[in-house]
Image: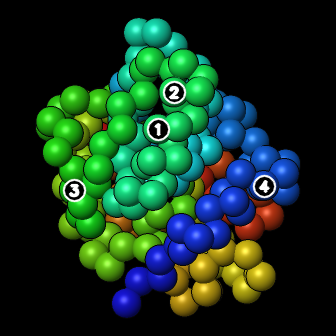
Amino acid sequence: MAYKFNPEKKQKLNSDDRKKQMPPKKTLENMLVTKNMDLLDIGVGIGYFSIPASKIVGQNGKVYAVDTSEEMLEELKQKIEEKGIENINLVKGKDYNTDIKNNNVDYIFISNVLHEVEDKILFLSNYLNKLRSKGKIGIIEFKKIEVSKGPPIEHKISKEQLKEYFNKLDLEIIKEVDINEIQYGIVAKK
């Protein structure tokens, strides 16, 4: 069974340590998120990346913030209302999909979520249907090393394994990012 993040620990998602290790705006820019994109953020949690992404994509872009946790979506909804953000759409996710139309987004962003999914190819295949032609997918995961942060090592996905998934799905890797000492990112295009 896959490791699942406990929503009761949601305060960890916005810690000063995390902001230092993985500054959201800089991380998104390194992962090739740009102005005017329609971005699908899967497993948004409290909006750590969705809120900065809404600023990067700007008024002509949209962020679809997907999570399976009502608690996380409710917290993000409050933040959006407090900040007056108008280009984030909250979407209730299912385990392997969501009701967003196919061919509707330019970029799929998945940070520290894929290791929580049992059938990774099914999950990615379903979400890749949402991506427009030549769209990009960026995934951040924990390096498969023994450290105190993140999921247990047996649930972590090595960079080589993620590249194999992309290869199986006929995605072209366009950038690899060393996020910090315990996380990496890979961007590919359809």
Q: CA distance from mark 2 to mark 1?
A: 6 Å
* Relative side of 159 to 65, left or right: right
Q: Name the one closer to the observer, 34 or 80.
A: 80
Mark 3 packing: few (<14 Cα in 10 Å), some, or many (20+)?
Answer: many
Q: In the image, which disc is placed on residue 125?
A: none
Which residue matches tag 1? 77
Instruction: Describe the element under mark 4 as helix, strand or loop.
Output: loop
Quarter the N terminus occupies: bottom left
Which residue matches tag 2? 81
Q: In the image, which disc is placed on residue 97?
A: 3
Q: Earlier in the sequence, mark 3 or mark 2?
A: 2
Instruction: Describe the element under mark 1 as helix, strand or loop.
Output: helix
Q: Nearer the viewer, mark 4 or mark 3?
A: 4
- Whether residues under marks 4 and 2 lie with C-beta atoms below 8 angstroms apart, the answer is no
Which residue matches tag 4? 15
Q: CA distance from mark 1 to mark 4?
A: 19 Å
- Whether residues under marks 3 and 2 lie with C-beta atoms below 8 angstroms apart, the answer is no
Q: Earlier in the sequence, mark 3 or mark 1?
A: 1
Q: CA distance from mark 4 to mark 2?
A: 21 Å
Q: Nearer the viewer, mark 4 or mark 2?
A: 2
Instruction: Describe the element under mark 3 as helix, strand or loop.
Output: loop
Disc 4 residue type (three-letter): Ser
Q: Position of residue 2 (x, y in %)?
A: 41, 83
Q: Position of residue 48 (x, y in %)?
A: 61, 44
Mark 2 packing: few (<14 Cα in 10 Å), some, or many (20+)?
Answer: few
Instruction: Describe the element under mark 2 as helix, strand or loop.
Output: helix
Q: Name the one closer to the observer, 133 or 89.
A: 89
